[in-house]
Image: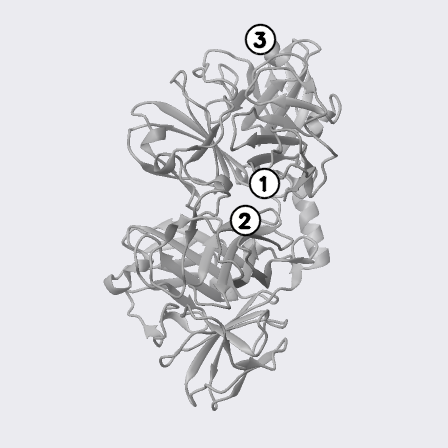
Amino acid sequence: MTNIRNALIQSAGSAGGDKVYVEDVFSTQCYIGNGSTKTITNGIDLSGEGGMVWTKTRPTAYPASIVDTVRGIKSDLRPSGGDAAATLPATAGFAAFNDDGYTVNQWSEWGSLNTTEAHVSFTFRKQEGFFDVVTATASGATFSVNHNLGTIPKVIIGKETSGNGAWYVYHASLGTTKYTMLDSANAAGTFSLYTSITDSSFSYNGIGNTGANYIFYLFGDDASFGDGGDEQILKTGIVTANPNTSVTLGFEPQWLLLKKSNGTEDWLQVDNMRGTPTGANDAWLSPNTAAAEVTNWDGVSFTATGFTLQNMSAAADFIYMAIRRGPMKEPDAGTDVFQAQAYTGDGSTREFALNITPDWTINTPRNIAGDARASNARLTGSGEEIYTNGNQGLYDAGSAGMQFDYTKKIKVQSYRDTNTEPYINWHFQRYPKVFDVAVYTGDGSGTSQAHNLTVIPELKIIKNLGESIFWVVGGSVISGVGGRADNLVLDSDAATASDSTYWDAADTATTFSIKASNGASSNNGINYVAYLFATLAGISKVGTYTGTGNDLNVTGLGAAARFVMIKRTDNTGGWYVYDSTRGIVSGNDPYLFLNDNAVEVTNTDYIDAHASGFTITSSAPDGLNASGGTYLYLAFS
């Protein structure tokens, strides 16, 4: 972050009080256990603020574990049954709550927390308006419970911890006369279990055991988060499936809990880390069972403004609780958004630790002629590829393709790991004001689609996922050169073309324009992916420059560039890509083209490092530096 931006942000924070974002209070963490002690760093302050961690092994039928800072690190509950809380020995379960996450142990009976297989954990931090944890001792069959949520709870989950008993759930959409049970697939029952619900207390009625201990988890939906302190990060509701139904939340979710309330059906828990890709199978967990993760049903897709249910039981009523996707705050540095990763293949399947959690990865071999530039996105699903150097639709590489269901990690399969061959991955993580990904389904009539970039996209790259049709590129960086109808093609070296069939309207901070009659951006019933970019000082730059034929400093980024993509717009020219991992130096700089599958070129000095961006050298060809030529570029620091 630049000093100026840092000072402005600190000043704003001091003037308006501490801002709270969803990433401060909630995290989904996917990890592989190591069979020993493992520390999970997710940025959530549990030791100072308090909260709850809910963990489940994914490929194995084993109960989930819930611990919280109020009962203590060794008091373990299992949501798939009514057993009392278990007190674990020192070597078992969780080891510590930390100021940036937690630590788990390994022990045979409770090994689901850290066996050498895939796990997922959900961390909730105590925060007014979002989440609270309270305990109570029953004074009789009915007793009152005080809380510190600071708002009227929309969901309450309660359980007796000193003895056996169901997990009773209040959901505001069902009202105080009905309840469900987290450990049961049964339909909602009729009974006034939770009543007199206020912003500081509620009554638990009729089933209390005098002297027994209880735990309650409370969830609120206050609009008190984000930069302006006026955004929601949690929403609840009820929806009737028809069987396909869209729900508008006003934000893109990252976590969703569903329960059919008018019939018997398991609870369903999905998240964007394990994946809810559009048009592909989702990863489901059912809290009321110990069952392994289910991955063979396409039931939910997250959208930029909510979620869509599909293939559900017709006329089924589903209550839901959804948590907003993060991050909500802008990045501090370009390293938060972009990472280049070079590796040499060894023919195996490997997991690479990263500094970011990628939402878009372009993978390419550097020395294998004819191989594809494989574009992979979290929203389109692990193993689902499209190619920047071709017009094919989505290709299902399955388990052989890149796998995204990890936190700060990528799984590379043998398909992308040819023995002894060098590779480069370009990883991008979504952040407000810098980079966003949107997946949508064309309807043949719409002129725009929602996005969460939070500013007007300066560059948009769109691909039809279901048909063989070219990548179309637009945005204000191109319309600034020509008109709004101007476009480029990512899989071509062609110059800018003016064609009014691509965009119908001006882009905004919440929507981007498409054209209903054009197959490259909107065919009825076809899925699309859009990559959106904007300029943020010191982090990213979408811009243009005019070639001189001499050394030319391009300084709009305001920091040294680690990634540069350049395309000549007024004439033919390839889509050059440079990165500092392979080398942006005074000397030879390797480059690849996104629009073809040629091997990497390593013996040219067309670009040099610059403290405020990059330098195009006098030796660069017309594709980079023709006198009077016009060039589009995307750069990250």
Res. 285 visible in picture: yes
Q: Where is residue 16 in the image (x, y as percent from the top left)?
A: 71, 58
Sooner in the amino-acid sequence: mark 1 or mark 3 = 1
Q: Work out whether 526 lies above or below 631.
A: below
Viewer-closest of 53 and 153: 153
Tell me the quarter of the image containing the C terminus. top right
Viewer-closest of 146 and 374: 374
Marks 3 and 2, how far apart at CA = 47 Å
Sooner in the amino-acid sequence: mark 1 or mark 2 = 2
Q: How crowded is mark 3: few (under 14 residues within 10 Å), some or many (20 or more)?
A: some
Marks 1 and 2, how far apart at CA = 10 Å
Viewer-closest of 559 and 253: 253
Q: Position of residue 67 (x, y in %)?
A: 41, 67
Q: Are marks 1 and 3 in contact (CB under 8 Å)?
A: no
**Which residue is under mark 3?**
619
- SS for dot 1: strand
Q: Do the residues labelled 3 and 2 touch (CB within 8 Å)?
A: no
Residue at (49% x, 64% y) in the render: 260
State the image quarter where residue 5 is shown: top right
- SS for dot 3: loop
Q: Do the residues labelled 1 and 2 touch (CB within 8 Å)?
A: no
**Which residue is under mark 2?**
302
At label 1, the amino acid type is Tyr
At label 2, the amino acid type is Phe
